[in-house]
Image (cartoon, rainbow, N blue to C red):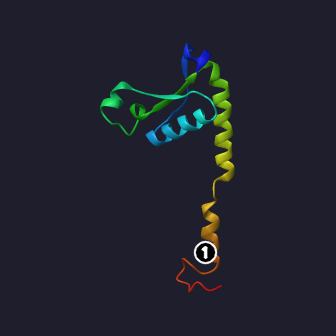
Amino acid sequence: MGEDESAPWVRVITVDNPAQAVITVARLQDEGIPARTQREAVSQAIPVAVGPLAEIHILVPEPMLEKACLFLERLASSKRRHRPKRTAGILRARRIGFGHGGSGEA
């Protein structure tokens, strides 16, 4: 890790489920950004799925914070652009007769 070993670790994002935390840490690490998770001590002993105790903080070394923020912003905007539109498939199905008791023929 080099110079980041002695740097303080700071929160870059907070997520609310373990799978999202693992994926976020892995994506940051793939970008060359050291990352780790932090949870409230009580939530490690007693599994909590709702509220502030369920939050998982993603931490990065302070010198990497700006790079991490920029990467996460790019990732979020990419997901918004590539999110499939579920209504398009529903409208297409209705147009050809599915979902209204139709035979499915156009």
91 or 73: nearer the viewer: 73
Which x, y percent locates residue 87? 62, 64
88 or 40: nearer the viewer: 40
Which x, y percent locates residue 5? 55, 16
Q: Along the horizontal axis of the image, is 65 left or right of 22?
A: right
Secondary structure beneath disc 1?
helix
Against 68, residue 5 (above or below) is above
Against 12, residue 83 (above or below) is below
1 or 60: nearer the viewer: 1
Can you say which quadrant of the picture contains the C terminus? Answer: bottom right
Query: At label 1, which amino acid type do we have?
Result: Ala
Q: Quadrant of residue 99?
A: bottom right
Against 33, residue 106 (above or below) is below
Which x, y percent locates residue 46? 30, 33
**Count of numbered circles on the image:** 1
User: Mark 1 sits on what residue?
Assistant: 93
Which x, y percent locates residue 104? 58, 83
Work out which residue is located at the far top of the displayed protein and give it: 6
Q: Residue at horizontal 64%, vertical 34%? A: 31
Q: Quadrant of residue 95?
A: bottom right
Q: Residues within 10 Å of mark 1 (few under 14, many from 20)?
A: some
Q: Along the horizontal axis of the image, is 85 left or right of 47?
A: right
Q: Residue at horizontal 58%, vertical 21%? A: 1
Work out which residue is located at the far left of the displayed protein and give it: 46
Q: Residue at horizontal 66%, vertical 34%? A: 71
Q: Residue at horizontal 68%, vertical 32%? A: 70
